[in-house]
Image: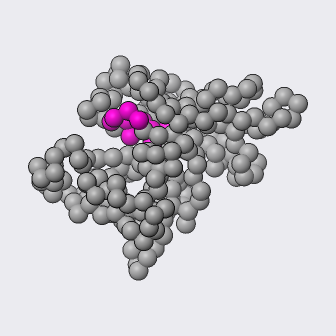
Amino acid sequence: MFRNLTSALQQTVAGTCALVSTTKCVQVQHRWEYEALHGTSTFPCNAAAPRKLRRACLRKKIWRPTKGADVGDVLNMIQEQGGVRTTNGPTPAPSLLPVHSWQHHRWDHGGGLTADRIADLLDTRGPFVGVLWVCPWYTLFDSAEDRDLVYRSGCARDEMHQFLSVDCFGENNLGLHSVVCFGYRVCDGELHVLILDNHKPTGPERWIHFSELEEVFTISVKLMNPPIHQGQGGRPIRYPQSRHETD
């Protein structure tokens, strides 16, 4: 199960994967909710690069360039700010995409993150933000180049092996990373999750083994009413895209 996911936002500031992936996920949640009612390609909004979110998180000590940020803290800040900011659109286009609620799921808490649980969350609550452990070979995986390649770190959900991998490869080459999870497939009885990364305007998209997900954050939004895709005189509203974040 997977649907097209469009977001040109790209991580260009070190340590901001949680901010960028959360921003992208909120935009896509709003788009899917809106287009389910009004039709494909009717949602006009584009999320802005999270510059103001980053500064707010820095002030509150939620985000640090060397350590990044916790996705839950970022979602709380987005709610505090009223939503994800959009690029400038013509009146009556909204300037914020609100987050109604969110929920945290960990592999070792509650019902865990089994293959069945992840597939169910993607079917009923997806897309969502996922956090996984990345190793030096992670960047070699790109579904556009080879859809059969599936990323495995070799130390997923294992703090001791993760600690040893840092000792082996260095802390600059691996660590926890936040992405948008939006689809899955079952191959030979194993669940593979399709993710959208933040390193290029196209993602890239990668397939990962479901067990790589340490935690996920499901996000709920409310349908934006009244219809916002028709501007004055019935002309379609279109927002500019925001691709990059600069200091």
Seen at 33% across and 28% down, the residue is: 62
- Of 139 and 103, nearer the camera is 139
The verdict on residue 174 being magenta is no
- Spot the residue most to the front: 145
* 87 w.r.t. 5: above or below: above
Quarter assignment of residue 109: bottom left
Q: Residue furthest bottom?
A: 188
Residue 211 drawn at (x, y percent): 33, 63
At 15% from the left and 57% from the top, the residue drawn is 161
Q: Nearer the viewer, residue 221 or 19?
A: 19
Left or right for 64, reference 143: left
How many circles with numbers are drawn on the protein? 0
Q: Quadrant of residue 118?
A: bottom left
Whether residue 29 sits left or right of residue 155 in the image: it is: right
For the residue pair 141 and 167, the one nearer the viewer reads as 141
The reply to whether residue 246 is visible in this rendering is yes
Q: Is residue 150 above or below residue 168?
A: below
18 inside magenta stretch:
yes
- Kindly give the residue lying farthest to the right in the view shown: 233
Q: Answer yes or no: is residue 193 visible.
A: no
- Which region is colored magenta? 12-23
**Image position, residue 41 (x, y; %):** 71, 48
* Residue 240 percent location from the top left of the image: 64, 33
From the top left corner, tell me how far across and down residue 78 is, in percent: 48, 30
The residue drawn where x is 73% and y is 26% is 90
Q: Is residue 102 left or right of residue 17?
A: right
Q: Identify the image quadrant of residue 113.
A: bottom left
Q: Quadrant of the N terminus?
A: bottom right
The image quadrant where one finds the C terminus is top left
Name the residue located 79 percent from the left edge and 37 percent from the top edge: 236
